[in-house]
Amino acid sequence: MRRAIKDKLSGILDDSQAGGTTQSSQTNDGRRQMTDRVVGFVREKSGQIASTVQEHVSSMTDMTGALAKQKLLQTLFSSGVVQSEHIRHALQIGIGYFLDQHSHTSDQSNAYTRREKFPTKGGTTPSHSIPDFDIEAYGLDTFNALLTLYGINCETLRSHICTGELKEIVNPSSSGSLLYLTSDSTYLVKTVRDYDARFIQQKFLQEYFHYIQQTPGTFLAKLFGVYGYIPYISQQRGITVDSFTLRFGIFANIIPTNLDIHEKYDLKGSSYKRDANFSERIKSSATFKDNDFREIHPQGLKIPKQIYHHLKQILTSDSEFLEKLNIMDYSLLLIIHNMDNPIKPTRSGSFEALMGSVRDTLLLGMTELRAKNQTNSLYEPKERLRLRRPNETLGFVYEEIPKFDVEYAKEFGGIPAINGKGERLLLFLGIIDILQTFDICKVMQRQYQTVENRDVVDERSIVEADFYARRFKEFLFERVFHPADEEISTVNKQHRSSLYPEILSS
């Protein structure tokens, strides 16, 4: 909006100056006209300006509150007042209750927030053995409509959330955040900041729903619901029930659970300090970043031409949608399964990459328990969700891509690709972290970074939403993905059969 106001005022001044140069006798009239037009414009935009200032002040207040809440949560966990085990069970009980009620009740409330008490003894809600708590459900009607667009129902979602134990991935006492993985690794349940929850309610959810409705092939992270957990804490500790609510979002895990993951990248399009840190690089399932990709894949990845153009169209639409909502700092999570070389790449990295990152731990949790789930026959396969896989999203015509290994693509749903060594790959991808707006806190952070080091300010992750989207698209389709020509060759099948004999014989 600031840019629009600046352009409008510049236009007014330019028009006035052009008219004022004709005759000296018209100078005073020109000045009065210019003044009247500027005053009129300011009056017209005053409401928008006030609204923008109010949003910025609110975001700063929310940020301060989020930091205080994160610190408080760490204290409560460290002291044993709140236990992660209780939260996990409470979420399963509460989410299961609301999904069950929503699927069997025809008379639904129009309220965005619905709250229910869950006493130990039960009653209208199930009995349980953990301390009393409340659960809030947000936007149930809209999320139920989203489930229909996804091709699943409340019973299916409830089964995946409530069957087995939620697995804790992040230690809340050290990070102040919570991340859980369902027993079959199909869903992630992660904490959502209060101001993100407010953004979802006030603006994001309805826009997101309409976009999913119009763009079923989107690669945006799939959001299935938002819930709040409210523990009963003694008043003597200075915390009332209403002042302490932990909010969680349910997201689909886009990482396949039936294939080995050889490479994993978190790509933003920026370059400043975009290297995996030392502790991340030594992990067996490391999450690499932009500079790592540039070094490991200097020639990028080649995919069939028609798939390249379809992928470019969809990801461009996705980034433009996020730009419209002033969202930035999102990432493309790129997962690579190598059909010809099971040896995972390594990179020494730079000294800057020695700094740790909690966010990398969140990404690690997406695949940490994949191998265990492969041998667990108690849970139904992920296909039961009937979510679109990458190949279905792009509408592959397999007969038109004979140079690539389409057997794997058909079976596992990945996008066929080839790296610079000619090795055949399957790609799985999605855009994650889609709730961060370029608010006043990000504006202030960018201004500080400009003062700190002006030379690299445009290479950082914190930039305006329009610049972020443009850089993101350029990086993906100029450095990461390339359309393959017809002369491309691949590793022979004999090599592949020695690596995957069990799949070829099946």
Image: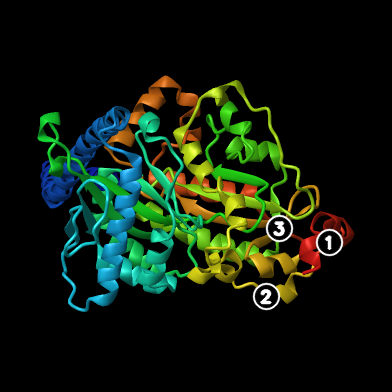
User: Could you say which disc has been placed on residue 372 in the image?
Assistant: none
Asked which secondary structure carries label 2, the reply is loop
183 left or right of 451 in image: right
Kindly report which numbered mark, 2 or 1, lies closer to the viewer in this rendering. Answer: 2
Q: Between marks 3 and 2, how big is the CA–CA gap? A: 15 Å
Q: Give the percent coordinates (x, y) of residue 173.
A: 36, 31
| Comes first in the chain, label 3 or label 2 | 2
The figure's colour scheme reads rainbow
Residue at image position (12%, 39%) is 240
* Quadrant, the C terminus: bottom right
Q: Indicate the amino acid at tag 1.
A: Glu
Q: Indicate the amino acid at tag 2.
A: Val
User: Could you say which disc has been placed on residue 397 in the image?
Assistant: 2
287 left or right of 177 in image: right
303 left or right of 312 in image: right
Do labels 2 and 1 touch, CB within 8 Å?
no
Residue at image position (31%, 30%) is 74
List the residue tagged with mark 3. 417
| Comes first in the chain, label 1 or label 3 | 3
List the residue tagged with mark 1. 487
Q: Indicate the amino acid at tag 3.
A: Ala
Q: Residues within 10 Å of mark 2 (few under 14, many from 20)?
A: few
Q: Give the percent coordinates (x, y) of residue 420.
A: 77, 48
Foreground residue among 42 and 198: 198
Q: Tell me: residue 150, above or below residue 283.
A: below
Q: Between marks 2 and 1, how big is the CA–CA gap? A: 19 Å
Foreground residue among 296 and 281: 281
